[in-house]
Image: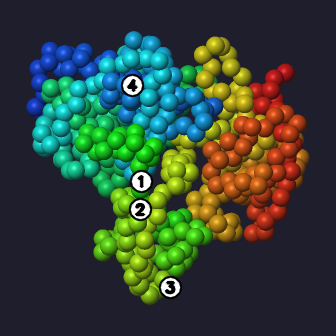
Amino acid sequence: MKNSKLAGNLLIMTVTLLGLTSISQAGADPAASNVREIVRKASPSVVRVEVRDGLRRVATGVVIDKDGYIATTALISPRDEEVKVIDYEGNQAEADFLGFDPESRIAFLQVKNKKLPAISKGSSAELAPGSWVCALGISPESQIQVTQGIVSSVTVDRLRLNITITPGMSGGPVLNEKGQLVGLLRGVYAGDRLYFPGPRQTPPGGYPFEQMETPPMGMAMAIPVEMLNDVFKEIRTKGKVERGWLGVSIGEDADHRVIITEVEDASPASLAKLQPGDRILKINGKEIRNADQFISEIRSHHPGQQITLTIDRQGKVLDVEARLGNLPEEEAFRELELRFPDIFLRFPRDMSLMVRPEGPDFEFGVQNYGFLGVFLEQLTPELSKYFGVPEGQGLLVARLVAGGPAEKAGLKVGDVIVGADGKRVETLPALSRILQKKKKGEKLVLEIIRDRKKMELEVAISGSILEEGRD
């Protein structure tokens, strides 16, 4: 039992990004020669998408329009970083990030100064349980890889597929037996939960890693091509997808019931007089079983729509009416960062991972980050409450580098960082964005909570992590 648990834990930390070269599963698959022809025709439309933000994040994308528009996973979404696409022949091109949808988790790019052929589109309406499908991705060696299987079920907003995919194939095309696009890979299913194979991150030594829970064998989810087309049309015309917004921070209790931990000022939740501590039982009569379902239910509604929330307030069940607002883009980014902190990590928690590059292929680009000498952990809403964080979440100081800037400034283990230079900080990426702008010798003002009391400390940036490691 111990050995099997250990093996599972090892798998969590060592899953690679763009996995399989060819996997065949039981089902009504076409002849091998036909599969080769499908892959040959579709390959020029499949690209690798890269975002560099200290670490290099890599995912799959597919060209969906003759003007160079590319669909991919929202987990690749950059802030201000450079985005590149690389085709299966190794040709590189810069791309503009157009936007993403927080509910379907589809993002769109447009290639600069490059013409790539658009993939042929089909219809998910022609799919049924047992239909053959394949999914494509591009390997780190710029080679096409393919995995195949059958459709498990079809609905208007999702395709469940009996195929094996690996981290980094999210954003890749799902093709029917005619070689037509019928869906875009989103994640991996395990029961009622959905896992998202995210972008690979490459540390020193060249071994890709991703921190994710063990995926199930051979069950994936894709967004139907019709939904992809609708999202693309809205982003292309409006620059965003309009999704419902309530304006609350949430957590889960021991029974996975959703608890409101914070209500934003002047938000729909505030106008509806929702309160921290309220437990969400139902939305429009539909039982809410966990936080993911709650978020999806809110996002599935349009701004302006009225919903009825059934809540438990100190043991009393109440129905509360709320009219949803429009999800702000910054809130959508923040939601991704909070739900997938390891994918959007801008600098490592563990400074002991920092080593000097040994050659030109070094990809762990941390030299731009100001050195603090602190080990940080992102708090859950429950732990934030325990440490006395009154609003949202924060960053727990887990360990300090002896003699480092943070220790010299008076920071202590157990402190919780909630702000930097006057800006609210809840996630590692949020603090990282502030650090990236700092130069050696500049000051960083940290707002912290110590013993449930707020205070400020001024830390002198001592240069880059790599500079600190030099002889």
Residue at image coords 62%, 57%:
379
Q: Quadrant of the C terminus?
A: top right
Q: Based on the displayed image, in which of its 4 quarters is residue 126 positioned?
A: top left
Q: Do the residues under discs 3 and 4 have CB atoms within 8 angstroms?
A: no
Q: Nearer the viewer, mark 1 or mark 3?
A: 1
Q: Amino acid at mark 3?
A: Gln
Q: Is residue 196 above or below residue 338?
A: above
Q: Give how far apart the Cα atoms at labels 1 and 4 are.
A: 24 Å
Pick whichever, 115 or 43, lies toward us: 115
Q: Amino acid at mark 1?
A: Glu
| Residue hosting label 3 | 314
Query: Left or right of 369: which side holds 17?
Result: left
Q: Is residue 311 above or below residue 100?
A: below
Q: Give how far apart the Cα atoms at labels 3 and 4 are.
A: 54 Å
Helix, strand or loop for disc 4 = loop
Q: Do the residues under discs 2 and 1 have CB atoms within 8 angstroms?
A: yes
Q: Earlier in the sequence, mark 1 or mark 3?
A: 1
Pick whichever, 431 or 234, lies toward us: 234
Q: Earlier in the sequence, mark 1 or mark 4?
A: 4
Q: Give how far apart the Cα atoms at labels 2 and 3 are.
A: 29 Å
Helix, strand or loop for disc 3 = loop
| Residue hosting label 2 | 303
Q: Amino acid at mark 2?
A: Pro
Residue at image coords 32%, 37%:
185
Q: Based on the displayed image, in which of its 4 quarters is residue 43 positioned?
A: top left
| Residue hosting label 1 | 242
Q: Position of residue 312 (x, y in %)?
A: 44, 81
Q: Residues within 10 Å of mark 2 (few under 14, many from 20)?
A: some
| Residue hosting label 4 | 68
- Structure colour scheme: rainbow
